[in-house]
């Protein structure tokens, strides 16, 4: 699969039973396909910290104004904005329900809440915005449980 941001070939990244695709030495984005999202609660117990340190090529510019195509099925992905400040935006494929995270987004999500109360509050906001922007209960609950597993 080719990276939807910089067209570099994605490489497989394994963590437990999860097999993700990462853009190593390119834009350092991360692709989660729907099947991997379904087992991402594994990350709650053993978060693969290496995912926060995928090497980025400093010459690659990430253009967030562009619509990206799904690396798997080539259809346009929808950008799901989780907060009003637009710090957290996930590219979601309406066809295969996979999702793309840009450089640094995963790390910021992990650090956005300082305690459980704040985490619950953030999750409630994110969940509301997911329900507004994503069609289909499966896709919604998949993204919500992904966020939970990253934030805890
Ligand atoms: Zn890339
Ligand atoms: Zn797709």
Image (cartoon, helix red, strand yellow):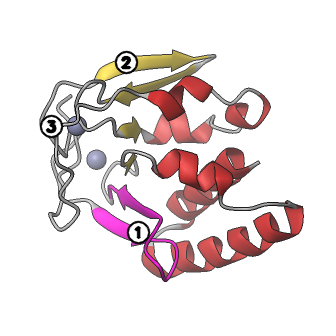
Residue tagged 2: 12
Task: Judge whether 77 appears above or below 70 on screen.
Answer: below
User: In the rendered view, does 77 fall on the left or right side of 151?
Assistant: left
In this rendered view, identify the residue nearer to me: 113 or 8. Answer: 113
Residue 145 seen in this snapshot: no
CA neighbours of label 1 inside 10 A, class few (<14), some (14 to 19), many (20+): some
Instruction: Identify the residue at horizontal 77%, vertical 75% (top origin).
Output: 121
Furthest residue to the front? Answer: 58
| Structural distance between the alpha carbons of marks 3 and 1 | 26 Å
In primary-sequence order, the first of circles 1 and 2 is 2
In this rendered view, identify the residue nearer to me: 60 or 121. Answer: 60
Mark 3 CB in 8 Å range of ligand 1?
Answer: no
CA neighbours of label 3 inside 10 A, class few (<14), some (14 to 19), many (20+): few
Question: Residue 120: image x %, image y %?
Answer: 80, 68
Label 2, secondary structure: give it: strand
Where are the magenta residues, as a range?
78-93
Question: Residue 107: image x %, image y %?
Answer: 56, 45
Q: Where the N terminus falls, by quadrant?
A: top left
CA neighbours of label 2 inside 10 A, class few (<14), some (14 to 19), many (20+): some
Looking at the rendered structure, which numbered label has been put on residue 59?
Answer: 3
Looking at the rendered structure, which numbered label has been put on residue 44?
Answer: none
Looking at the rendered structure, which numbered label has been put on residue 80?
Answer: 1
Label 1, secondary structure: give it: strand
Split into quadrants, the picture shows ligand 1 in the one at top left
Residue 63 seen in this snapshot: yes
- Label 3 vs label 1, nearer the camera: 3
């Amino acid at each position: 699969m080719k990276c939807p941001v910089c067209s570099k070939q994605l490489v497989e990244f394994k963590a437990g039973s999860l097999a993700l695709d990462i853009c190593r030495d390119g834009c350092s984005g991360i692709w989660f396909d729907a099947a991997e999202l379904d087992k991402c609660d594994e990350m709650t117990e053993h978060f693969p910290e290496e995912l926060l340190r995928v090497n980025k090529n400093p010459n690659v510019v990430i253009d967030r104004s562009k619509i990206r195509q799904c690396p798997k099925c080539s259809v346009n992905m929808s950008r799901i904005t989780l907060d009003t400040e637009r710090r957290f935006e996930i590219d979601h494929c309406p066809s295969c329900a996979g999702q793309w995270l840009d450089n640094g987004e995963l790390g910021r999500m992990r650090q956005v809440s300082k305690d459980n109360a704040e985490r619950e509050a953030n999750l409630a906001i994110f969940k509301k915005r997911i329900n507004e922007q994503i069609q289909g209960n499966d896709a919604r609950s998949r993204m919500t449980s992904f966020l939970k597993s990253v934030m805890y």
